[in-house]
Image (cartoon, rainbow, N blue to C red):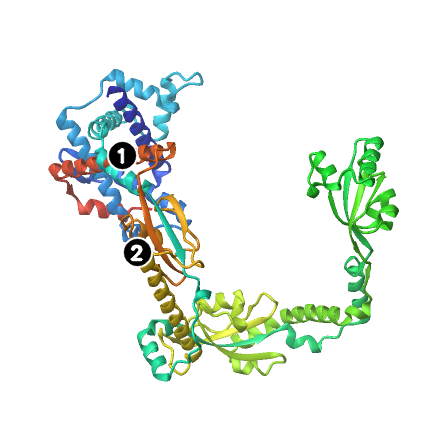
């Protein structure tokens, strides 16, 4: 018990020391003087103005480091961080009062032992150095008396904390209950009803049936929040006809792609290399008399066909073996022939003829590519002029008079993906635009420019019955199929419950010892949940939009006695013990705070906030 408290004390001291040093660093910019010395009194303990300001500044710096933004005192108080800091200091003061009431403290010998363990107070040999001790305290603006008094209080608090938390254990019942829930297993049979097995006669719904289905499932035909957007766009395709491409540019692009257009004859080849000429010749002789196969030779070398595959090669890739390999018929083995790795046998698996492309064959393709590229550059040069027109008050409708410019309107929502809404650049601007925004030039991924204006924003609303006909008919037919599948599943379930044989085309799949976390891709998502609510022998139908299944529970199994489950149970027990200890300590702190009757000075708090930097 003493050792545990000692270890806990050391940890607590280090945490508070770190908080103290970080809080004091750079705090000289704030100076609190005057008759007010504390922001709160807790029993006989005081929360000093400097302590509160120091902790508030530490919280400010931590938040600024996290967000990358400056956090003035007004924003800190809006977030309630001033109350968090004050509450934390009052809790510490309440624990100090409780320690004092209990008469807890550490002696001088234990205090010196704690101080000597602090690395900042040690010399290079790891021994306590009074010079380093004094120097370190001077750097943070503390004297020895004040620091040692703080350390005594912190150690006393640690003793109180340890007395409450150490040795706290949650009853095993909760741990075992959770372990049994997580690790419980079930064995079951199941099958999915195949939609293709459902024979439905072709039926066209009447308008009355469609109207009834529409009214009953109006959520399926509700349009999302929609922005009515007018846009003007200038696309490279609209300018291509204006671009002239000279012959020299076409020839240069064609030459740059000679590797693509002038492809020499090639062979698909495998190469099996041997240590010497005799081994290669012996292997070839066995092949010639059908004493072995090429695959067997490869396997005997501890290789696979993938290891020796050279892919498609040209004559230049094969060196001195090129002529023999290219003269061989497809499917034959030639060699032994020299290679850069030694004597080898080559098997020819395919013949790829040379491909020669003339400029005239790809002239239109290259011309369109060059013209489109130049059109993109022309759009870039025109973008500034168009933006100036918009800034000068020109409307999108007036931009339509510009060469190549198109004007359009779209009912845009987050699911839109047709036309210009297929571009990420458009979707990004459309999602952020508001009714107050003025049109500005933006660019699409293909080099097009566009500007847009939000005309109207429509709230979610039912799609008109007349406009939803295609979607409505498809949903009606899908619902009809789902109902037929559910009826078939009910029929199969009835057969299982009665013990009758299933038709030959229906095959049950058996699962053994699955836990709640098991995932079966083809099954409805709710099936595993339903399985654990069933008793052995029960049969159920489970359905979702993905699938309809019939499941029969065959066996309930206890938690598997495996090292993994044992480790999980132990970890869960430790976590529950820690949670209980923390909850008890928090309740204890609340109690000591209530008994200490904290008194807060609002004027002192306001003074700190007014002088806060």
Query: Are there few (<14), some (14-19), or many (20+) residues within 10 Å of tag 1?
Result: some
Residue 529 image offset from top left, x and y in percent = 32, 52
* Nearer to the camera, 124 or 309: 309
Quadrant occupied by the N terminus: top left
Q: Which residue is mark 1?
A: 578
Residue 67 image offset from top left, x and y in percent = 40, 49
**Which is in the foreground here, disc 2 or disc 1?**
2
* Nearer to the camera, 377 or 337: 337
Secondary-structure class at tag 1: helix
For the residues marked 2 and 1, what is the alpha-carbon distance in whole angstroms? 48 Å
Report if residue 3 is visible in the image. Answer: yes
Q: Which of pointers 2 and 1 lies earlier in the amino acid sequence?
A: 2
Relative to 457, residue 424 above or below: above
Q: Which mark is residue 530?
A: none
Residue 361 image offset from top left, x and y in percent = 79, 69
The residue positioned 22% from the left and 31% from the top of the image is 169
Q: Quadrant of residue 596?
A: top left
Q: Which residue is mark 2?
A: 497
* Nearer to the camera, 390 or 380: 380
């Amino acid at each position: 018990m003493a050792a545990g408290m000692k270890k806990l004390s050391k940890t607590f001291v280090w945490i508070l020391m770190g908080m103290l040093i970080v809080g004091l660093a750079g705090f000289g910019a704030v100076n609190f003087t005057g008759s007010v010395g504390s922001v709160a009194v807790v029993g006989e303990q005081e929360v000093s103005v400097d302590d509160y300001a120091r902790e508030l500044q530490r919280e400010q710096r931590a938040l600024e480091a996290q967000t990358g933004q400056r956090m003035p005192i007004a924003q800190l108080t809006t977030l309630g961080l001033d109350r968090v800091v004050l509450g934390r200091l009052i809790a510490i003061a309440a624990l100090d009062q409780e320690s004092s009431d209990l008469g807890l403290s550490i002696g001088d010998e234990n205090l010196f032992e704690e101080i000597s363990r602090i690395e900042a107070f040690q010399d290079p040999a790891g021994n306590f150095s009074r010079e380093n001790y004094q120097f370190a305290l001077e750097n943070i603006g503390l004297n020895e008396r004040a620091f040692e008094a703080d350390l005594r209080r912190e150690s006393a608090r640690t003793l109180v904390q340890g007395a409450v938390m150490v040795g706290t254990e949650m009853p095993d019942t909760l741990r075992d209950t959770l372990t049994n829930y997580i690790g419980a297993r079930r064995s079951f049979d199941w099958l999915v009803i195949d939609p293709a097995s459902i024979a439905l006669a072709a039926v066209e719904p009447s308008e009355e049936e469609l109207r009834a289905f529409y009214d009953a499932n109006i959520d399926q035909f509700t349009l999302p929040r929609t922005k009515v957007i007018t846009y003007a766009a200038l696309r490279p395709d609209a300018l291509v006809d204006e671009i002239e491409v000279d012959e020299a540019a076409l020839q240069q692009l064609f030459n740059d792609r000679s590797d693509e257009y002038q492809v020499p004859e090639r062979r698909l080849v495998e190469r099996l290399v041997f240590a010497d000429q005799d081994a290669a010749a012996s292997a070839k002789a066995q092949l010639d008399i059908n004493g072995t196969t090429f695959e067997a030779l490869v396997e005997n070398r501890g290789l696979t066909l993938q290891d020796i595959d050279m892919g498609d090669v040209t004559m230049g890739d094969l060196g001195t073996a090129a002529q023999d390999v290219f003269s061989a018929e497809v499917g034959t083995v030639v060699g032994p022939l020299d290679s850069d790795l030694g004597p080898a046998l080559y098997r020819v698996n395919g013949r790829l003829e040379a491909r020669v492309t003339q400029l005239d064959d790809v002239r239109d393709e290259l011309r369109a590519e060059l013209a489109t590229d130049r059109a993109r550059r022309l759009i870039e040069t025109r973008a500034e002029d168009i933006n100036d027109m918009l800034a000068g008050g020109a409307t999108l409708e007036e931009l339509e008079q510009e060469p190549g410019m198109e004007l359009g309107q779209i009912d845009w929502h987050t699911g839109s993906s047709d036309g210009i809404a297929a571009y990420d650049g458009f979707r990004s601007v459309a999602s952020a635009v508001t009714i107050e925004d003025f049109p500005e030039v933006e660019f699409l991924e293909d080099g097009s420019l566009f500007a847009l204006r939000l005309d109207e924003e429509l709230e979610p609303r039912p799609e008109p019955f007349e406009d939803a006909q295609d979607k409505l008919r498809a949903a009606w037919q899908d619902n009809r199929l789902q109902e037929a599948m559910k009826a078939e599943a009910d029929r199969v379930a009835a057969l299982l419950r009665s013990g009758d044989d299933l038709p030959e085309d229906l095959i049950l799949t058996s699962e053994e010892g699955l836990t709640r976390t098991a995932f079966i891709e083809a099954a409805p998502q709710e099936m595993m949940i339903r399985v654990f609510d069933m008793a052995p022998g029960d049969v159920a139908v489970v359905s979702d939009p993905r699938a309809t299944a019939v499941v029969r529970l065959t066996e309930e199994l206890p938690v598997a006695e495996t090292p993994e489950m044992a480790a999980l149970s132990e970890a869960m027990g430790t976590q529950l013990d820690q949670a209980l200890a923390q909850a008890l300590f928090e309740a204890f702190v609340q109690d000591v705070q209530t008994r200490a009757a904290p008194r807060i000075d609002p004027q002192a708090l306001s003074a700190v906030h007014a002088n806060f930097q």
